[in-house]
Image (cartoon, rainbow, N blue to C red):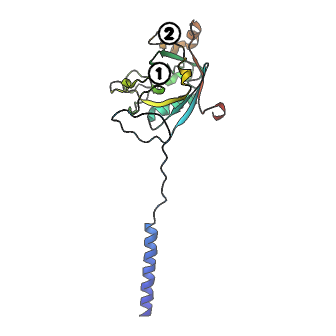
Amino acid sequence: MRTVRIYFLSFLLCAGLCSAQEESPQPSVTPEQPIQHSLKLLPGKDAPALTRKTTLTMETDLGDVVIEVYPQAAPNAAKRFVELAESGFFDNTPISRVVQGFVAQFGINWREPHRDWKEKSFDDDPTLFALERGTLAFAKAGPNTNSTQVFINLQENNSLAAPKYNFTTFGKVVEGMEIVDQFAMVGDPSMGLDQGRLWSNGESYLESLRMKPTMIKRLYVGKDSSEK
């Protein structure tokens, strides 16, 4: 009888320990904390909390502009912009279109191998955040035709978020907007420089211009050269 009782107690002890091991909680995963940013949701939109950002510097011949890109705001656009910057695509290219009170646009590189990006379009992201002054979005010619050209909003342009346009905010100028305001207005008052001529032979086209555009010297990931 004593042997049975000891066995029974041993069974209960083992069962309890085994149960405790099986039911022990797994290590919890701490969620990423939201970052500080100044993007604003469009009315009626719902977006995930922004917990990540990539900081980039645009060195121009007028001064530096610091840009924050938010992958969760527009994943496809954010990924492409950073890829282009890391490849050197934006280096030594003009701010090709400046429309006062509207946008400043850039993103044409006619040199090899950069010009190949022109045909690498990517799909639209959902439009979630307001196109306020200082925000960035990709220019396009219709649905899912984004590729290399980007504009900085010089004013609030939320009309561009309408479904028939669906331009998508993916980042924002956080330092140097006073530099952006000084970008030279060149070419046609509405369309800027001739895009066809830029893509075909930008070097000679720029040399032929009496009024020169503001040039991007470099656009790279990081806030100064040591972070590149």
Local packing at callout 2 (Cα closer than 10 Å; few below 14, some 14-19, many 20+) is: some
Q: Secondary structure at mark 2?
A: loop
Amino acid type shown at disc 1:
Leu
Q: Residue furthest bottom?
A: 1
Residue nearest the observer in this picture, 228 or 50: 50
Image height of 3 relative to 90, above or below: below
Viewer-proximal residue among 223 and 220 = 223
Residue 210 in the figure: left or right of residue 139: right
Determine whether 35 is above or below 89 in the image. below
Comes first in the chain, label 1 or label 2: 1
**Label 1 vs label 2: CA separation?**
18 Å
Locate the C terminus and report the quarter of the image it occupies. Answer: top right
The answer to which of 144 and 25 lies nearer the viewer is: 25
Residue at x-position 50% and y-position 33%: 69
Q: Position of residue 173 (x, y in %)?
A: 52, 28
Tell me which corner region of the image, top left, top right, bottom left or bottom right, holds residue 208.
top right
Instruction: List the residue tagged with mark 2.
Output: 187
The x and y percentages for residue 130 are 41, 30
Residue 102, how many percent across, how many down? 44, 18
Q: Residue at x 40, y 23 (%)?
A: 157
Q: Amino acid at mark 2?
A: Gly
Q: Residue tagged by mark 1?
A: 154
| Residue drawn at point x = 37 percent, y = 32 percent | 42
Residue 218 location in percent, x, y?
60, 24
